[in-house]
Amino acid sequence: MATMTKEELIAKLGIGSVDPETQDKMLQNVAAAVSSRIMNRVTEKLSDEDLDTLSDMIDRNDDAGVENLIKSKYPNYDEFALQVENEVIEELATDGARLRSNMATASPEPVA
Amino acid sequence: MSEEQPTNESMPVNQENQEVLPPEAQLEAANQRVANGTASAEDQALVQGANIVAATMAETPASSEPRPVEDRVIVNDLYGPVTRQIPVLEDNVATATFGGDQASAQQELKTAQDMKTYLEGRDYTDAKGKLHDAETGAFKSMNDANARPESQTQTYESMTSDQLISKLADSLEHGDRTTSIDVQDALMEKVIAMSGATDDVKERLLDSYIKRAEAQVASTSDNPADFKNDSAPTEPTTPEVEPTDPEDAGDSPESPAPEDSPAGEEATPTPEVEPTNPEDAGDSPADEEVAETAPTSESEIDPTDPMHPGYAGYGAGTPEGEGVIIDGGGLVTEESDPTGTGDEENVPEENGEGEGTSERDQAIEELQQNIDRLREMVESLPIQKILAELDRVQQVLERLRNGESGESGEEEEEEEEEVEPTEEMAKSPEAAAAESRIAYYEASSNYAKAKIAAEGMFAGAEKKAAFETAGAALKEAREKWLNAEADLVRSADRIGEDLQDINNQERAEAQGMLDTYLKEKEDAGDDYDGSLEAQIAEQQATLDKISMYDGLIAEHIASREARIQEFATSELTELSKRVDDEMLAERTRRHPKLTKINNWLQKHPKTRIGVGLGLTAMGVVGAATFNAPLVAFATGAKAGLSGYGSYNASRGIGEMIASKKMNKTQLATIDDYLGASDKQSATRRNSKRIGSAVAIAMAAAPAILAMTETHHAASAVQHKPTATPTTTPAAAPPPAPSPMPTITPQGGDEYPWTFGMNNLGTNISAHDTLTKITNNPYGISFVGNGMGGGSGAIESVTIPGQGTFTDFAHINGAIAAIMGK
């Protein structure tokens, strides 16, 4: 599953006219949304025993262990995360295009 | 004595001193009497019996080994009490040839044949209580045991939990996956039906059931070394296995108790001979009675084994008979117990006689174990963590509540006006957008809860249906929101055009007045006394301001595309994240340990767990969160929303426009338009609505922000149009009698007036407030055209001991310190 560049993402999301600083903030918000979606999916696979184990690992500052345990829930975690990321981006792009289209409909012409 | 009977001094005599003929002679005599029609009932019975014997002898091969016989009084419904000589059945060999040459009654022969067939086809248990196949003698699963006809009708639904647990244990022990799954499903259904228990409690209860089954498996052993599985397994030691009643022998797997035998049989039927379904063990009262009468065999069988005829289940001795689980502070009971009768029978005290004491002791011990286990479960509950999580969520709720209704207590101290929205307001796009947003929030919250509930292992059809309904409602709410926001943008975006119209009107008016003044001046010629200079200057200044407004408005309109893009994407991102965060919050509520994991992710934002490869490659790292960071994200999203207003802003615009106070035709000046917000109630100003409706609508555009600042800075003068500012930028600040407060630079991306409304809940351009800021006791001075009566925002702040700053962060920080916030 190919990844896109930042410019491609900005174009896909339809925020090319926004100033760069605002674009970066918006991309961070998108990343936060992706993160929420990923962790939502991951938590579906975490059993009570897994939570106990993760809790113990965190207490022991076993960061690598925490990461490995979570990633072990999927055969290819990176692919899974990328898939979720693309899913969120696609939703935002599709709905965004539609929303912008609706917003732009019958918008008044700039007054000279 | 009959004359026909020869007298034989050696022949025995009966009590009546009559000669007793040998059996053969008796039979012959009886035959003769039957032939003559003078036979008595006894004669008839004798003849019939003989005929049966003869027939039997013709059918049954003679036994190679003579069977011991004995007289047995047999109850014969047809013929009354009859004494017959029947073979004594002692072992399998005997049963194999039962019905041999000594059987003399048709009924008993039939019974014997039935018993033979029955016994030959029955699986049996050894002294250890283990089931053996009837043909091969090999160990056999209890589930595969021969079932009596009536027991086959017993379904899982009719079983108690203890019975299901035992059945599950047996299936696990023998690797019977199909039965294992079916029994687990039955246990789940039983737990689901429990009332008064939450899903968490039910889940733990089911888990405890499964663990009990596993414990049962672990406690028993199929190690062949422990048992003798020889070719000729030994039947339990019982003296006799004689059917004393055809019905008992043929129908009831359990041998009748002594009192059940009308003939007063001394035989003590053994439970081990009976069908070995564990589910039968606790059902019939006969089981208990049988157990009492067969202490020998019983002592060789583990009383806790379901095969034990006296097996009373795990819950024996408890009030309900079934295990009483106390979890999460709630008492969970089954709604129904189809085999409730069995529970009562399982109470050791009711069994009465016999070894009730040992059973009672074991039941007591089991109950104590249950109590200990329940105590451990309760003690293991993370009460403190639950309370801490509740406090945290309560705080989030309070923040959200304050965010909706107002900042904090200081706002509530201000007098609030109640302004009822007009009908036009309710119909306005702003109101519709606000309502659709709230509806979407509610739908996403309901969806999250329904989804999590439907994922539970105890989720029945009702919860799944509720999830589907919530999903449909969320989709509908999203569609409404999309349409409402689009309408809002289309309507709100006209503000730029409206302002342009107003600006044009003012320009025309100001230009007209200026032309008039200039004409008068020109006409006055040399007689001109200079009295019009002030008016001329005023109009020129007005025209300059209008030109500035033109630029700002044009900039605002030109940024429409960018604002639309930012708004649309930000809105959608927030709403998408909200649904996921709602679900995460719901999961965290059910599993508080997720909070720890969430916190860990926040401390490790660069972990590759929470972000996809694409965004990682771009260097975009968002804050990974589990719980609903709605407040945090809302703050960030607000920036994107400010172009077209949040709910609060929309409300302000809606009120302004719909109330017809400030529609295009009624606005005399753009200042009036911008000043409309000052006429809003304190409630609306202080409730997250960013003050001026127009400022809210155009806050994203820096140009319009500047225009707004200009207006509000100037409005401080307008309160006293003829008065000059009490302070001037050049005026020396009064001495600071108070210690300098801590000034924290903040709000660097907001104009001072906007910062004041957003964060301080204060219109800093209001006369009193402006006076307080200007005449602060700390010696902090502000510079800007607006402060001096002109137009423009605050340009700089001088803080004694720190220096002069022109950035908004220091200006806003100083204002906040002066205001004590």
Image (spheres, coloured by chain):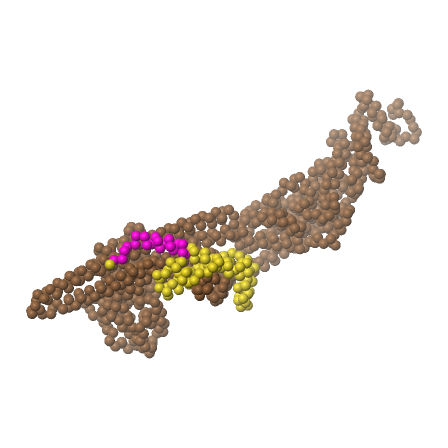
For the stretch drawn in magenta, the main secondary structure is: helix
Query: In the image, residue B795 lies at what x, y percent?
Result: 28, 71
Q: Residue furthest left?
A: B527
Q: How many marks?
A: 0
- Can residue A110 be found in the magenta stretch? yes
Front-most of residues A11 and B429: A11
- Can residue B629 be found in the magenta stretch? no
Q: Residue at x 46, y 64 (%)?
A: B616
Query: In the image, residue B560 lies at what x, y percent?
Result: 31, 59
Chain in brown in the render: B
Rendered image quadrant of residue B25: top right
Q: Residue at x 35, y 61 (%)?
A: A17
Q: The magenta stretch spans which residues?
A: A92-111
Task: Locate residue B682 relative to residue B82 in the image: left or right.
Answer: left
Q: Residue furthest top?
A: B36
Task: Locate residue B287 relative to residue B795 in the image: left or right.
Answer: right
Front-most of residues B207 and A109: A109
Examine the rendered structure and indicate whether residue B122 appears above or below residue B567: above
Q: Is residue B216 visible?
A: yes
Query: In the image, residue B800 lies at what x, y percent?
Result: 31, 77
Task: Locate residue B800 relative to residue B202 in the image: left or right.
Answer: left
Q: Residue at x 70, y 53 (%)?
A: B222
Q: Is residue B435 visible?
A: no
Query: In the image, residue B147 lies at what x, y percent?
Result: 67, 42
Chain in yellow in the render: A
Q: Residue furthest bottom?
A: B801
